[in-house]
Image: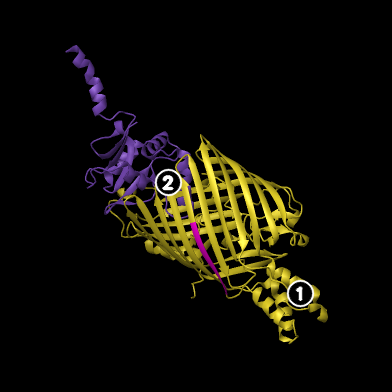
Chain colours: A purple, B yellow
Amino acid sequence: MRARLSLLPLLLALCLPARADIAVVVHPGSPLRQLSAQEVSDLYLGRIRAIGSQRLQILDHPRDSGLRGRFFSLLNGMDLGRVNAYWARLQFSGDTQPPVPVPDSRAVIELVRRDPLAIGYVEAGAVTGAVRPVLILKE
Amino acid sequence: MPIPRSCPLAAMACLWLLLASPPGRTEDAGGAYAPFSFAGYGTLSRGWDDRDDLAAIRDFTQRPADGAATGPSWRMDSRLGMQLAYRFSAEATGVVQALFRDQIVQDFDSAIELAYLAYQPRADYQLRLGRVGYDAFLMSDHRNLGFAYPWVRPPREVYSWLPLFHLDGADLTYTAQREDVHWRVRAQLGRSSYYIPMGNQDFHFGIEPALSLTLQREAGPWRLKAGLSRLRSVKEAAPLARLHAGLESLAAAALPGVSADAARLRRETSFKDSDIDYFTLGAAYDDGTWLAQAEFLRSRTTTAIETSNLSGYAALGRRAGRFTAYAILAASRPDRAVLKPAGDWAVIGQAGFRDVAYHTANSTRQDQETLSLGVRWDMDQRAALKLQLDHARIHPDGYVLWFRELATNPRASSVNLLTLSLDFIF
């Protein structure tokens, strides 16, 4: 019995998102239920602006934030220098403008809660019932 | 095909008023998104070469400070760009970008690199109206943005004589996704003008219309792009007025062996009402460790003085931590033979004038190759330091990318150019 109890925290850790994981979140009323890493990568690299017919308002974190660095590293393996160079090309050529930067995860959750078309990412531990996770990026 | 000549900023201002109260999304989080964004980029660069009778130019709008004798210089590659974007709604955005760089005429118009309104009624369509970047080659719309590419500058054999940075007009972009492949088609129509150094004078080079059609395919680490452009040069070169007048009078004089020669030279040294066609194919690969890029350009013109070439380059690089080492091999060959005198002008005492005329007709030939070796150090996420050594070999009558002494033209020569640059974004 004691041995079974000692396994419980481990089982929980495997089932629940760890604090270091990152959750991609949308409005609870959004028709989006689940997104692939490829779809989210395409959205955050400006290659697509919509999933199906669902056009999205993409929210990002400040250019040098640690969370942004971890997000792209887990999402598609790009480091921030490469992401910044990639987006600089799109932004300053006038091809497309980058996602809207917001200060932190609290602000992301607040905006996603208010905008049915918004999509953002936050620390998995910061997810509340006000938003719906559609992808968990495991640390 | 006349293009409205109004200032792109004025056109933008009108549309700004129209879009100021768009039927925007009520779900736009109550205006919670900041409508303005400001960002910029720049390069601080210094170059050294080992020739006193040659001076490199980054592009055709530059004139080195001391002509061919220019030594180490900050001016060739240093620049600063600033961009203001205003988000009217999820569908409409306005962008103004100012770029300060070395060019022979520095005024308000030449400093505005972008000034457009973008309207995207659907996720897969975008219309831009105003001053937009010329989108034909892999790097033609961001060649001043050094932070975006590993090397110090886009290969000069392909990019330095490209007579368009932006155009005043409109473009329409359509994007589509099939499986993991992203397609983009863009059509552009507009006009443009720049000042080009011609001796000690400046030539106001005008293009109208400029038509461009590009197809881009992106999948995984690959980006492929094909482009077709047709540009019509509409202004005659005022600095060549005396030369043209002399040729016209000789052509009209019915001198055996000379008049036909003069008529041909007059035709071949004309910029007005001549066409420039570009066909480009480019491929770029970047998997995070290895990067490669290659591009092929065929330019065809209707007169000898507007350079007509086969050009291309291949680049290979490898990242190791914050460092990227790379090599580029670029080459350009003229599509026409050197124009040579057909008649004996000495009999009328005009041999000197003939030489000047032929030199002028052949002066824009581009015949050279360059091997570049360099390293980029990403100092942090917004700044990169680059060191690049170029070894260029130039063939006789192929010196258009260099300010040079006249005596240099008939012979082959080589030059080494070392450049240290700091590229940054903010």
Q: In this view, does B172 lie to the left or right of B325?
A: left
- Position of B279 relative to A18 (above/below): below
- Residues flagged by tags 2 and 1 on a common chain: yes
**Residue B262 location (% of width, % of height):** 71, 79
Residue denoted by label 2: B221
The answer for which chain carries disc 1 is B
- Whether residue B77 can be seen here: no
Three-letter residue code for mark 1: Arg
Q: Is residue B96 left or right of residue B260?
A: left
Quarter of the image where the N terminus of chain A is located: top left
Q: Is mark 1 on a helix, strand or loop?
A: helix
Residue B202, disc: none
Three-letter residue code for mark 2: Pro
- Region of the chain picked out in magenta, as a range: B274-281
Q: In this view, does B420 lie to the left or right of A88?
A: right
- Position of A116 relative to B111 (above/below): above
Q: Which residue is pictured at 25% across the width and 35% down the height?
A: A128
Q: Does the magenta stretch include residue B275?
A: yes
Find residue A63 and report its image quarter: top left
Q: How crowded is mark 1: few (under 14 residues within 10 Å), some or many (20 or more)?
A: many
Q: Which residue is pictured at 66% across the width and 55% down the height?
A: B57
Residue denoted by label 1: B354
Q: Is residue B152 left or right of residue B216?
A: right
